[in-house]
Image (tube, rainbow, N blue to C red):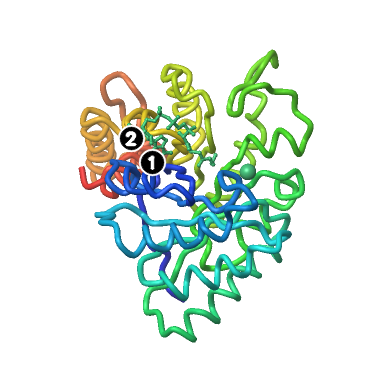
Amino acid sequence: MKAKPRRLRRSQLAVPGSDAKKLAKAAASDADHVFCDLEDAVAPSAKQQARETSIDALNNLDWGRTVRCVRVNDVGTEWCHEDIITLVEKAGENLDTIMLPKPMNAGDVQFADKLLNQLEKKLGLERRIGLEVLIEEVDAMQNVVEIAGSCERLECMIFGMGDYAASQGIAVRNIGREGGYPGDVFHYPRYQMTIAARVSGLDAVDGPFANFNDEAAYRVECRRALTLGMVGKWAIHPAQIAPALEVFSPSRKDVDFAREIIGAYQKAAAAGLGSVAHRGMMIDAASARLFQNTVDRADLIGM
Ligand code: COA
Ligand code: MG
């Protein structure tokens, strides 16, 4: 069994796969992860051209340390198999992950997994291409636990609130934003998906926020996702990259404090104590474990 690669996903930037200019801008951006979109950002008549434009971008742009991903069309369309085959055959060496939208169940993800197995064997690819899935249908939410455990190749689940709202019949006017519901109308699906992701060792990521001029509201959504245990959020415009990077990175102060708590706990444990007071707060094994999450995030970022 190959170990899952650990990748940064604080900001996942969506770029229409048909737009060479935006792809170049995305490659040069600070986003941890960019996905070239062949799905909803591309009109049916432009699907073929978008595939070729994205392949060209993967092969010829300097992506630095950015995770290179392509969102293919879903398994219910006539494009999915060809998207995957063409992409991997022409740009498999320059592709880190494939994002699969609208899976309904584990079988949908396993279709992509098996196709990738065949292609990797045929082409002799050494690096395994990862899979990411969007949880954006009520069926997927119902089956989220089996989807999370569907295959070893899966690395990440994203909550896609636009399609999800449509699928459930939730009445919102602006993608990513609740309207008139007391509390967060997306709290339950976000929570549910994040639990399933954590059980299977996957990254949970929050989907789009359409109003890219409202940074304050975007930050609120980022903090909400972070609090639930998600590791990042989509950006649909370059203006959303910096806020997500900031919110999903612990501050120097947070990291120092986390290390201090863990150190204080270890000292107490060595002295035979299970819980001690530290700066007026009780700390025990659970505190050390909780703050270890902050240290793990900092290590991945390289802080
Ligand atoms: N990736 C890379 N570059 C982007 C970008 C993106 N997602 N969105 C905008 N830009 C670039 C523009 O090309 C422009 O570049 P320039 O200054 O060199 O001309 C600059 O950022 C400012 O863009 P702006 O004029 O504010 O927006 P726009 O009208 O060009 O585009 C959208 C607005 C919404 C069409 C665009 O942000 C977009 O395509 N977003 C992604 C859509 C998508 O992928 N949806 C599917 C997933 S939800
Ligand atoms: Mg969608």
- In the rendered structure, which amino acid carries the disc numbered 1? Arg
Q: How many marks?
A: 2
Quadrant in which the C terminus appears: top left
Please give the name of the residue rendered at 64% of the width and 35% of the height, measured from the top-left corner.
162
Mark on residue 245?
2
* Left or right of 133 on screen, residue 136: right
The x, y position of residue 51, in whole percent, is: 51, 60
For residue 272, say whether it is visible.
Answer: no
Q: Position of residue 95 (x, y in %)?
A: 40, 64
Can you give x and y, in whole percent of width and height, for residue 60 in the image? 30, 62
Ligand 2: image quarter:
top right
- Between the C-alphas of marks 2 and 1, the distance is 6 Å
- Reading the chain from its start, which is encountered first: label 2 or label 1? 1
Along the viewing direction, whichever of 122 and 285 lies nearer the viewer: 122
Dot 1, crowdedness within 10 Å: few (<14), some or many (≥20)? many
Question: Which amino acid, by three-letter code, is at mark 2?
Answer: Leu
Residue 55, compared with residue 88, is above or below; it is: above
| Residue that carries the numbered disc 1 in the rendered image | 10
Residue at horizontal 53%, vertical 54%? 71
* Residue 255 placement, left or right of 152: left
From the viewer's perspective, is residue 152 above or below residue 261?
Answer: below
Asked if labels 1 and 2 touch by Cβ distance under 8 angstroms, the answer is yes
